[in-house]
Image (tube, helix red, strand yellow):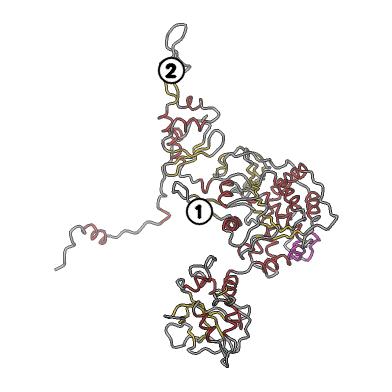
Amino acid sequence: MPKSPAPGLESVAAAAAAPVDAPLLGDMAPAQRRRPDPSATGLPPDCPIIALGKFGKTYFFIDDNGQLVDVSSQFTKGDIYSLFGRDPGKADALFPQYGKPVKDPATGDPMIDEWGAAVFEIKGLDQTKAQKALIRACSWAGIFDPNTQELGRGAHVGRDGQLILHCGDKLLIGETVGLQGQRRAPHYVEPGLVDKAVFPSGAELPPPSERPSEIREATETLQLFAQWHWREPSIMPLLLLGQCAAMLIPGALPWRPHMWLNAASGSGKTTLMNIIDWLMDGWRLRAESATEAGIRQMLRRDALAVLIDEFEAEAGDDNKMKVLGLARISSSGGTALKGSSEHKGQSFTAKSCFFFTSILHAPLIAQDRNRITVLDALTLPQGSKEPAIVPDVIRQRGAAMRRRMMDQWPRYLRTYDRYKLEIQREGFSARHGDQYGSLLACADMLLYDDAPHSGDLADMNEDDGRVKRYVAMLLPIILQAEVDGESDHVRCLRTLTTHKLPAASGLEQESVGRWIAKALTERDGALIDEKALNKLRTYGLRLVNAKPPSAKAKDARWGIERDFTPFKFVYLAVSSAKEHKGLAEVFAATDWKGGVWSQSLNRVKGKAEADGAAISRVMVRYDGNPESSTLIPLNLVVEWDQKGPLPAEVA
């Protein structure tokens, strides 16, 4: 006898007995969102403020002065009058609180307006009415996040790819091309809502010149820079010109290059720095002493150049390392997240080009060295005179150059790609292509009227060959950058091998590298020095011969031979245990403390396959239980000629 469906499942059984085809996606009606009636939700037509939206209980407006203002849900009278700024009485007129009827002085009868309605005296602001109107307008405007929708002073890229220069009190919109090919010349608009982005008013910046600079002016500036005594005089003035051009429009660039000027005493650094400052003419933040937090707070949403003089950084200077970290994320327009005193997260998008000066630049890790071009200005020869400079002439030239960068902007990406590709063709990394390609492309926009040729055709003229010529001149600079920009694992390994271990009373301390050499030195007829080996063990270090994984093992891990001999391929085993006291002492106060050293050392690799590479997760016993360790070929640690072939891993 068939069972009856369980109680409550009759409807499910009925649906299963009479299935219906699912509707096609194309037949489904789109989700409907409520659309406001403008007359019911908008502010009065002659209201001078713009409702942008809300985020939580905070409401955002562009006030009467064009500034971005956030107001809490209380909307006090002070808040409302502040929004109307220059004409607070306008708030009373738009949201009036009425009093008694107004009477005709002559007759005493109530006054009637032109529409036949009684006229009442206005006593002031109807706060409730204003609150409701402002809250309603922001609510219908939608969610507004200033972290992503506010753009400060400086250069930006519009929705259609045009360059926008935010001068604080006005915006200069670059040439745009409509769908039908119609062109609109560069033109000014007031700050506010443009292409769904908010450009609030700010302190006024000198506007670009009405005329773009000529090639002649860029050439003269290049010749001016060439008067300094450079280590690489054929290319460094050109790179400096490119850096200045980039600093004119940093916020618009897909990659923002930075520069560090090493200037010896008597090199004319102060004059050169003043020239760069005058070229920027206010479109920069300049300081001789600055913290990362100070730079962030001064810039806010602005995309301006940052000039920091006398940046005599040293390794381990935490504050200056943070400034370099800010420059690092600024290269690609990265976002930094910070907390506030109100326990609310805040984001800061860095879009600045940084320019540092010092006598000697700080040691730079690889990721910073690849983002910072280092120029060396040497002491001027005896009898040399610094060029006579008129500040106003330089300022005018900077304004004209900024205008030229706007007019040349439509070809920037093509020019940038040409240089970047040529740098990579020379065998350098994409990061070098970004850094030096942007410098050369920016200089190119000042020195030439058209984008360089692709280089694929045989009928190139002299100008078309400039990409290959400039990149060839650039090669010594990139090669030096590669030498300076040591990888993280190289620095970590050097920190390990140069660390001096404690010595007995009266004896000189010796480095880990020296103790390794001792361990492999014949002593008292023995091929190895057991005392030195034991010394290394106490610091989580051991010389071993690696044993390839067995083909039959389920867990194919490397191991070590039971007995060590220097006549086989030798490895230095380094414990990965972050609790190891010896290694914790070695890496204390470094970037690799807390066991991070194992992550870096796992990346150690020789230039050739025969040199070997680090092997991770190998169990090695030091003074107690076996510990997960990294094995590093000894020839990559110290000067050592391996006595045996590299162990071959069993497939």
Which amino acid does the dot numbered 1 rest on? Leu
Q: Residues within 10 Å of mark 1 (few under 14, many from 20)?
A: few
Q: Is residue 297 visible?
A: yes
Give the answer, above or below, for where 584 lies relative to 323: below
Callout 1 secondary element: strand
- The disc at residue 263 is none
C-alpha distance separating marks 2 and 1: 53 Å
Q: Nearer the viewer, residue 172 or 342?
A: 342
Write the start and end of the magenta stretch as one range. 458-474
Task: Give residue 288's position: percent from left, percent from top.
Answer: 65, 50
Residue 589 on image: x %, y %: 53, 65
- Label 2: which residue? 120
**Residue 337: which disc?**
1
Amino acid type indicated by mark 2: Phe
Left or right of 276, for residue 493: left
Q: Is residue 464 visible?
A: no
Sequence-wise first label, 2 or 1: 2
Asked where in the image residue 529 lies, by quadrant, the reply is bottom right
The foreground one among 198 and 259 is 259
* Closer to the camera in the image, 259 or 19: 259
Q: Residue furthest top?
A: 106
Tell me the SS state at disc 2.
strand
Camera-nearest label, 2 or 1: 1
Most distant residue in the bottom direction: 525
Q: Is residue 37 left or right of residue 193?
A: left
Q: Is residue 246 above or below residue 632?
A: above
Residue 412: which quarter of the image? bottom right
